[in-house]
């Protein structure tokens, strides 16, 4: 089966040096394993019929070839039903940025609800996440939202498990997650409002200090000649 058909399924061939029949899927795999090494997630995103153990062996080989670090995740991974999932305001803020990058100006709709081509879907997810990481962080910094969290967030939206809100003030879209207070507030407005308040507080402190300095007798004497 061609990996670029509407199903997008990439079938592994057991008697070859490469994991996928299609070179385009090999290229995707090279990028993907730098974002996640969770074998179950790789199986889901690529549609491969390769076993978890075989995927691990290919990951180990590729990481050895490029001098990359093998980071074998443990457990079942994140769940969007967890109370701790995207619970902090700064996490919601960055999730909002990812949402707007992923869905664009029109937001999620009928055309975005079903993605039948796994190749195109994966390309989009990797491109969006790499853009987020480049925009928000320096090269050596670890993003607050991992690639796995981003994928879990999209699953929650697809399954209608988390509502998307549109801010009337700044027009940003944001998720409201499990365990959050009933009162919705836009994380984008919250973060930028906090920054403005912090800047104003700092400016007020500087101005206050300046007034104290100019009110000293020595300064008054110089000012009065």
Image (cartoon, rainbow, N blue to C red):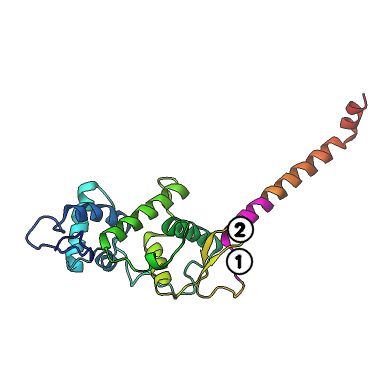
Q: Is residue 187 in the magenta section? A: yes
Is residue 179 among the parts visible in the rendering? yes
Q: Is residue 215 above or below residue 90?
A: above
What residue is shown with label 1? 185
Query: Viewed as shown, does residue 179 lie left or right of 113?
Result: right
Q: Is residue 159 above or below residue 125?
A: below
Q: Is residue 97 in the magenta section? A: no
Q: Quadrant of the C terminus?
A: top right
Q: Quadrant of residue 4?
A: bottom left
Q: Which residues are magenta?
A: 184-197
Q: Secondary structure at mark 1?
A: loop
Asked if disc 2 and disc 1 are in contact, CB closer than 8 Å, the reply is: yes
Q: Secondary structure at mark 2?
A: helix
What residue is shown with label 2? 189
Q: Quadrant of the N terminus?
A: bottom left
Residue 160, position in %: x, y? Answer: 44, 74
Tell me how far mark 2 sits from mark 1, CA to CA.
8 Å
Assess disc 1: are there few (<14), some (14-19) or many (≥20) residues with their C-alpha within 10 Å of its C-alpha.
Answer: some
Is residue 71 among the parts visible in the rendering? no
Query: Viewed as shown, does residue 199 lie left or right of 52?
Result: right
- Rendered residue at 40%/73% (across/down): 79
- Rendered residue at 87%/31% (across/down): 219
Residue 203, position in %: x, y? Answer: 72, 44
Q: Is residue 115 above or below residue 30?
A: below
């Amino acid at each position: 089966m061609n990996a670029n058909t509407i199903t997008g399924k990439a079938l592994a061939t057991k008697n070859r040096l490469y994991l996928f029949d299609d070179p385009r899927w090999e290229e995707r795999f090279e990028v993907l394993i730098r974002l996640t090494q969770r074998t179950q997630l790789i199986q889901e995103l690529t549609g491969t019929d390769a076993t978890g153990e075989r995927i691990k062996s290919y990951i180990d080989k590729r990481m050895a070839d490029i001098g990359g670090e093998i980071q074998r995740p443990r457990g079942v991974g994140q769940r969007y039903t967890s109370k701790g999932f995207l619970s902090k305001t700064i996490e919601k803020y960055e999730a909002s940025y990812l949402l707007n990058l992923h869905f664009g100006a029109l937001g999620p709709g009928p055309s975005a609800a079903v993605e039948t081509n796994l190749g195109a879907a994966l390309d989009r997810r990797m491109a969006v996440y790499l853009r987020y990481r480049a925009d928000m962080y320096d090269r050596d910094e670890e993003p607050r939202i991992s690639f796995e969290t981003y994928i879990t967030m999209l699953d929650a939206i697809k399954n209608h498990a988390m509502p998307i809100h549109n801010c009337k003030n700044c027009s940003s879209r944001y998720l409201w997650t499990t365990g959050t207070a009933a009162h919705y507030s836009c994380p984008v407005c919250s973060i930028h409002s906090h920054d403005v308040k912090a800047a104003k507080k700092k400016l007020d402190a500087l101005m206050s200090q300046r007034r104290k300095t100019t009110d000293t007798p020595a300064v008054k004497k110089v000012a009065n000649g």
